[in-house]
Image (cartoon, grey):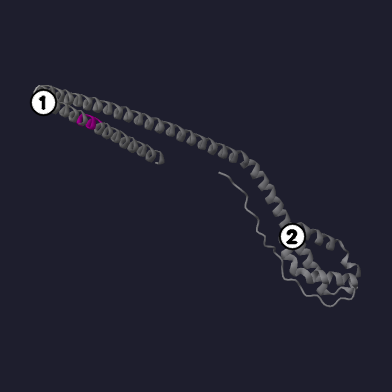
Amino acid sequence: MINYPNLPNSALEITEQPKVKGITNELLKQLQSALNSNSLFTEQVELSLKGIVRILEVLLSLDFFKNANEIDSSLRNSIEWLNRTGESLKIKMKEYESFFSDFNTSMKANEQEVTAILNANAENIKSEIKKLENQMIETTTKLLTSYQIFLNQARENANNQITENKTESLEAIKEAKTSANNKISNNQTQAITNIKEAKENATNQINTNKQEVLNNITQEKQEATSEIIEAKKT
């Protein structure tokens, strides 16, 4: 399980800023201006805590008490408030520095686990793809085999039907010729006419049977092709 450190609370423990009376000293006026702009500290903390701390360190490094006679008690309270605020920011900065240190440590510790999970997922995907490929090959082979068997059966049936029809036609011709030969002695012209009609009937029957067989083969082939296409879609 991947663990990350909790982000520190961004709230600062800053008490209400004390009010400062009018100041005439130029350096103290600058301090007054800095205190009055404290309303922007929250935004500055969110944007760059390090920048805020640096500003406070510069301000706190000044010797505000060198003109102690010009500083009243309210200004002293403001300076003390500024000191407390700076300490609060420093503490918060240490918390964030500790957080980022722990976060970097956890990322390094979790790197191997994340890599192992990704590699395992990749192997699983490859395995599933291989299974699908094998299933597709197996299904295609079965379909082709079934289609070949069907075609062989259809061809065999067609050949049998053609042979049977051909035999029947030859027998009909033979019978017609025998009948005609029996009548030749009595009426040769009528016999020849009968033979011609018998031959035409036999020929028409053969053509009809052949066409019917071809139509059956074509229909069965179309049905088989449609079944294969539907099977591939599924």
Magenta stretch bounds: 201-206
**185 above or below 232?**
above
Taking depth in this image into account, of 173 and 210 the one nearest to the observer is: 173
Taking depth in this image into account, of 104 and 222 the one nearest to the observer is: 222
Name the spot of residue 33 as percent of width and height, x first.
82, 71
Query: Would you say the magenta stretch is mainly helix, strand or loop?
Result: helix
First-in-chain label (2 vs 1):
2
Can you identify the residue that label 2 sits on?
89
**Residue 86 position by quadrant:** bottom right
Label for residue 125?
A: none
Name the element at disc 1: loop
Taking depth in this image into account, of 62 and 206 the one nearest to the observer is: 206
- Identified by mark 2, the residue type is Leu
Q: Residues within 10 Å of mark 1 (few under 14, many from 20)?
A: few
Image quarter of the C terminus: top left
| 88 inside magenta stretch | no
Image quarter of the N terminus: top right
**75 above or below 154?**
below
Name the spot of residue 136 as percent of width and height, x first.
43, 34
Residue beneath the point at 76% across and 69% down: 38
Can you identify the residue that label 1 sits on?
187
- Identified by mark 1, the residue type is Asn
**Residue lying at the far bottom of the rendered structure:** 22
**223 above or below 199?**
below
Taking depth in this image into account, of 68 and 129 the one nearest to the observer is: 129
Residue beneath the point at 75% across and 64% down: 85
Name the spot of residue 186 as percent of width and height, x first.
8, 24
**Residue 68 position by quadrant:** bottom right
